[in-house]
Amino acid sequence: MQSRIGRVVFGAFDEKAGAVGSLWDVVRDARLPHRPEVVSGVLANEASEILAKFFKNKR
């Protein structure tokens, strides 16, 4: 938030630990002075698969 990034773009939501539109929506928190544009779901299926494979390999 302190870097004042104008746009956040991401593909996959994280329902357990996400901070944009999931568990906590930090970029839309009214207590914070800066609210960037959010573009979500970009290549959502591909992003989810990549994350699932990554964490499967970590276990």
Image (spheres, helix red, strand yellow):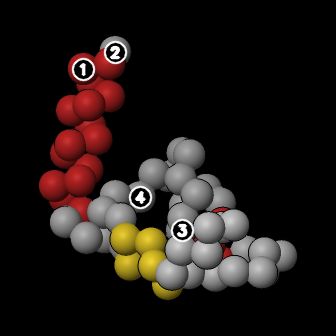
Residue at image location 54% in from the left, 68% down from the top: 21
Label 3: element kind: loop
Contact (Cβ within 8 Å) of mark 1 with mark 2: yes
Which quadrant does the C terminus fall into? top left
Tell me if I can see residue 38 in this picture: no
* Amino acid marked by disc 4: Phe
Circles 4 and 1 in contact, beta carbons < 8 Å: no
Which label belongs to residue 57? Answer: 1
Task: Say which amino acid is labelled 1.
Answer: Asn
Q: Label 4, label 1: how many angstroms apart (C-alpha)? A: 20 Å
Q: Three-letter amino acid code at disc 2?
A: Arg
Q: Determine whether, in the image, residue 4 is placed left or right of residue 56.
A: right
Q: Earlier in the sequence, mark 3 or mark 1?
A: 3
Q: Nearer the viewer, residue 23 or 30?
A: 30
Q: Are marks 3 and 4 in contact (CB under 8 Å)?
A: yes
Neighbours of disc 4 within 10 Å: few (<14), some (14-19), many (20+): some
* Residue at mark 4: 13
Q: CA distance from mark 3 to mark 1?
A: 26 Å
Mark 2, residue position = 59
* Callout 2 secondary element: loop
Secondary structure of the residue carrying numbered label 4: loop
Q: Residue furthest top?
A: 59
Residue 2 drawn at (x, y percent)? 69, 66
Name which of mark 3 and mark 4 comes first in the sequence: 4
Q: Quadrant of residue 8?
A: bottom left
Ranked by sequence position, the earlier of labels 4 and 1 is: 4
Instruction: Say what amino acid the circle numbered 3 marks.
Output: Gly
Q: State the CA–CA distance, disc 2 to disc 3.
A: 26 Å
Distance between mark 1 and mark 2 Cα atoms:
5 Å
Q: Is residue 6 above or below residue 20?
A: below
Cβ atoms under marks 2 and 3 closer than 8 Å:
no
Residue tagged by mark 3?
Answer: 21
